[in-house]
Amino acid sequence: MDQNNQYYDMDSYREGNAIDKKKKKKDNGAFCGGLAVGIFGTLLVTCIIAIIYWNSSNAGPAINVNDDDAVTASTTTRASSSKSKSTKNVKADGFVTEEMITKLNYLYDMIRSEYFLEEVSDEDLADGIYKGMMDALGDPYSEYYTMAEFEELMQSSSGVYYGIGAYVSMDETTNIPRISGVFKDSPAERAGFRTDDLIYMVEGDMTSGKTLTQVVMQIRGEEGTEVHVTIIRDGKQMEMTAIRGRVESPTVETEMLENGMGYLQITEFDDVTTNQFKDGMQELYNQGMKGLILDLRANPGGNLSTVVQIAQQLLPEGLIVYTEDKEGNRKDYKCKGDKEIQIPMVVLIDGNSASAAEILAGAIQDYGKGTLVGKTTFGKGIVQSVIPSKDGTAVKITVSGYFTPKGRNIHKIGIEPDIDCDFDGTLYYNVDDPVDTQLEKAKEVLKGLMKK
């Protein structure tokens, strides 16, 4: 793997790093799709001036951040418009004009002389400018991180969390955050949160217009403290209270099922996932596995490098995935085929399988190495890079799109299963003997494949 790889393919913010194979499923009710909220309404005049501050002398390397023991870097530069950090003394150059500087100073003076509510610091105003410029892209995956937010992002890759224990992603229909997975034995599970719950308010504060990072930082807090969250489930507003706690769990879980069927769930593609996957597969083989159910449901993605390494344990020789940037530059990720899986395989997917999970599912489908069962995946076919600054802040920005081995661009389309199967929440939640209808279908399909 190219050690200069700068892709950080992460579309969902973590509160932990595992989802219970039984509690992560999608409750397929109808959700409130008519919420008229917008996240990208920032004024352009407060957006464009941010380029003044982001210059090549201040930019650090682009990094691949998903584990604190495995941070790779590549040299990245950004064009400089000025080396000054004072808006009142900046020389207009390139994109930034004197008119922009004049207007920004006018707005600043108006805020300082007229604004009635709570005082806003100069630092917060400056952060608002930087965030506004990234918001103007209209891309929920591109984001400016303050120093505190970037530290939070780095912490999220360590595998230990102090929060409620859930994945949070941006719902593209409502543009507000939603729960895309709940972890086993987590505060979120104990409080009754479910996959696809829309996060409407945190501590009475509306989430519309906030980034994922901002919402997650509101949810997190000191261990043992309460957090009150207003959710929308099946079109109904509900009040939830969770006790924050330490969340730590592996990204791979395995179980030996009946009739020689092995079950392996990947909850996220972190740097630690590759070795956990290898160990899990070996454990299942040692128990006599003759067929595999690979569960990628509610998997929000993760490292591009990690999913490539796992695909190399399953696929035949050939292309795994390729990326193309705005200039049309292509990068291929290939498999030698020396570790190709030789037993039947069924892959479980759903609407919360995204990004790196779709790369793996798409490649398996293109090569015919497994049967996909479930629902159409999320449809995230783009890749992000995280670019830190020497001042401790950072920017995450979309840098390329990816394509399956057969050249499919699945962005905003998703990957359709070979066998469509709904998850019936009424048979799973709040019953004495829960039935996972999608897993049962996977068993049925795998049993047939194993007889051939």
Image (spheres, rainbow, N blue to C red):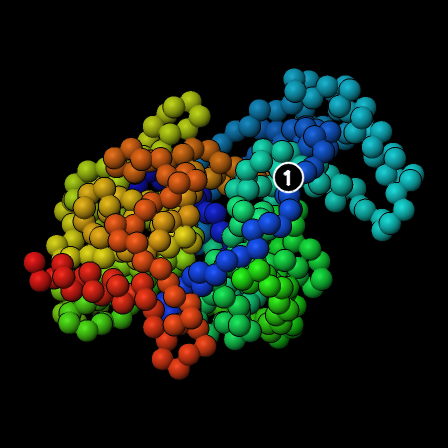
Q: Residue 309, percent across and down?
A: 28, 48
The single residue placed furthest to the right in the displayed view is 113
Q: Residue at x 92, y 38 (%)?
A: 113
Q: Residue 257, percent across and down?
A: 22, 72
Q: Residue 430, percent across and down?
A: 45, 77
The single residue placed furthest to the left in the displayed view is 452
Of 59 and 167, nearer the camera is 167
Q: Amino acid at mark 1?
A: Phe
Of 47 and 57, nearer the camera is 47
Q: Residue at x 53, y 72 (%)?
A: 192
Of 416 and 188, nearer the camera is 416
Question: In the shown orientation, is residue 379 left or right of residue 50?
Answer: left
- Residue 31 in view, yes or no: yes
Q: Residue at x 68, y 28 (%)?
A: 48
Q: Is residue 212 above or below residue 403?
A: below
Q: Residue 303, percent across and down?
A: 39, 47
- Residue 156 in view, yes or no: no
Question: In the shown orientation, is residue 123 left or right of residue 356?
Answer: right
Q: Which residue is mark 1?
A: 40
Q: Residue at x 54, y 47 (%)?
A: 173
Q: Is residue 302 above or below residue 6?
A: below
Number of on-image labels: 1
